[in-house]
Image (spheres, grey):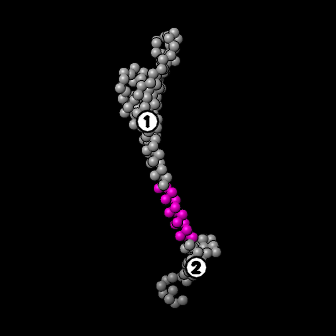
Amino acid sequence: MGLFEQLGIDGSYLVIALLIINIALIIITVLLYNRQKTMKNNLSVFMNGKDAESLEDAMIEKFLEINDINKLGRASAKEIIEMKEKNKFAFQKYSIVKYDAFKEMGGKLSFSVCVLTDNNDGFILTSMHSTSEGCYVYIKEIIAGEAYVLLSEEEKKVLSEAKTRHSVTEIEV
């Protein structure tokens, strides 16, 4: 103990410090052992009954499944594009306006209906109802959003409303 006395260090303090360091090292060792044991269990579950060759086969199988899913996704996208192209010629946009055609004589039983494709081709169907004269029905062709015959105010309104509607093909996938 001569060395400790020459340095002015009490030996009991040194023993206590070494004891604390040993306890800390034991705790760290236990924590590392538990972590290693957990990782070993996880690896055991992952490799459950498989050797490296069968694991490689399983991975190849999963990659093939992913490739099949990608092919299916591309095919589905192509089908969606084809359906959107076909739908351009289907009636997609519409509007209806009800009104009293003969001012106080027919009630609000008159109407104009506009039905358009994506390219704004279609028709306006107008029914004018009167209690005394009966009902008159007219149809007017619409090409590229324009009528080539005179339109009433209600027909202009219904055409304008129908043209502003969003068609199915305008919706992004």
> What residue span does the magenta drawing correspond to?
58-74
- Quick check: is 65 in the magenta stretch? yes
**Number of residues whose C-alpha sits closer than 10 Å to that of mark 2, classed few (under 14), some (14–19) or many (20 or more):** few
Residue 145 covered by magenta stretch = no
- Three-letter amino acid code of the residue under disc 1: Thr
Q: Is residue 101 something one can see in this rendering?
A: yes
In the rendered image, the quadrant that contains the N terminus is: bottom right
Q: Is residue 38 visible?
A: no
Task: Give SS at disc 1.
Answer: loop
Q: Secondary structure at mark 2?
A: helix
Question: Quick one: which residue is furthest to the right in this view?
Answer: 49
Taking the spot 47% from the left edge, 48% from the top edge, the residue there is 80
Mark 2, residue position: 22
Residue 81 position in % (x across, y down): 44, 48
Residue that numbered label 1 is attached to: 117
Q: Earlier in the sequence, mark 1 or mark 2?
A: 2
